[in-house]
Amino acid sequence: MSGKVYSEWEIAPRERLRKLQEKKMLKIVEYAYERSPFYKKKFDEAGIKPGDITSLEDFYKKIPYTSKNELVKSQRNNPPYGDFLTVPKEKIRLLFISPGPIFEPYTGEDIKIIRKNLAKTMYTAGATEKDICQVTLSYHFMPAGLFIHWAAEEAGCTVIPAGTGESRMQVDFMKKAGTTIYAGTPTFLKRLGEEAVKMNINPKKDLKLRIGLCGAEPLPMPLRKDLEETFGIELFDAYGVAELGVMSRECEYHNGMHLNEELFLVEMIDPKTLEKVAPGEEGEIVATTLEREAMPLIRYRTGDASAMTEETCVCGRTEARILGIRGRVDMLTKVKGVFIHPKQAQEVVEKFPELGRLQIIVERPEDYDQMIIYVECKESSKFAEWENKLKTEFKQALRIKTDVKMVNPGEIPVDARILEDRRKHYTL
């Protein structure tokens, strides 16, 4: 394990970790009911008292979900915090505003917990006191920049609070300061590589970057490989939601993102039935903050699609992992009993520069689901060859057989939905 273990709970037995989460869950449910007007009303309407919840099983069975729409509506009707605030306003020490808009208040105790949580991201990636971390995320109203800044401080790194933009200056700082860790979006890192070349700077030879901490955007494999080759670095992905915080991060094996289960109770649910899905199956990420003082969120539906496993990672960490972010659940559908998201198919196509856009059509002409994936190809003479190849590729990625039809560039309408479900009376 190259990344330092920051907490005993990263390698604790699953049953012991489950008991910790259960203990914290019971406490946060009672806390929210007593202090949050929103949750008192929500629980009362559901006919639930904190005393009715004695286990995680009770929690999953009885506690209602919270939606982002509820949070936004509550804050809009009763600005700035809505009915979610659980502390006196004078205890708030930090306030962010994220798209929605959503006001995110933090107490001094919240800040201490956030710093410890984020330090895991740095240590897991292998950060040390010898590193210089250049933070290129926004510090403007939103939490990303300051949060990763704190993480680097906790790990003992030297921090350059660069913020967004100013590509030429960013590259100049990297070279002169000897920056070893990049923190920001993958697309901005790509832009810095292009700017470096314009400045006659070889990103791999003239810069000292060794680690890239990416977030706020998807990190598809083609882009990851391109950036790692351009800069000679290892990239680490992370996942979080502004109103919840950073919940997971990659280790050196890059086989999913480890969840910080000390602070977050994460579930994966079927977005239509709202029932929990089996391990490894795609669903919607639902999270509960286990130690948030100012504004706890309980069973908060993120709207993001993923899958989760509790298998111990090769690195030795026992934390559950989310297996990539598939996209938004409004594009998630079930075919032949298996959840399908367009991003899964896109990741297959993106591996081959000869291919272009794609469209997924789902129909049920009789009693069985039928899925056809149309893919643009530059060489019509190789249509049959590509169709056979992609059938195998898609089966591995989607876990079901699918028909593949190659088409010429431009044959898929520009305004076509990437996934079109034509089945009638279809429910999950």
Image (cartoon, rainbow, N blue to C red):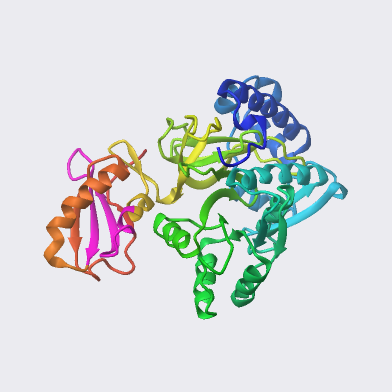
Q: Position of residue 213 (x, y in %)?
A: 58, 54
Q: Nearer the viewer, residue 367 or 138?
A: 138
Task: Looking at the picture, tell me which residue is in the foreground, 159 or 245.
Answer: 159
In the image, what residue occupies the spot 51% across and 44% down?
A: 252
Q: Where is residue 222, by image quadrant?
A: bottom left
Quadrant for the N terminus in the image? top right
Please state which of residues 382 and 156 is positioned toward the viewer in this rendering.
156
Give the residue drawn at x 64%, y 52%. 73
Count every numbered label the image shows and give the total.
Answer: 0
Span shown in magenta: 348-377
Which of the 4 quarters of the picture holds residue 36? top right
Judge from the rendering whether residue 56 lies leftward or rightward of residue 154; answer left or right: left
Within the magenta stretch, is there residue 248?
Answer: no
- Expressed as whole percent of the image width and height from the top left, the position of residue 219 reads 47, 56
Q: Position of residue 271 (x, y in %)?
A: 46, 41
Residue 8 shows in this picture:
yes
Q: Residue furthest front?
A: 205
Q: Is residue 193 positioned above or below 95 on the image? A: below
Residue sitting nearer the eye, 92 or 177? 177
Residue 209: quarter of image = bottom right
Q: Quadrant of the C terminus?
A: top left
Using residue 353 as the reference point, say whether residue 300 is left or right of it. Answer: right
Q: Is residue 417 above or below residue 169?
A: above
Report whether residue 363 is seen.
no
* Residue 16 higher or lower than 407, as above or below: above
Residue 285 position within the rendered picture, expressed as x and y whole percent measured from the top left: 52, 41
At x 53%, y 43%, the residue is 251
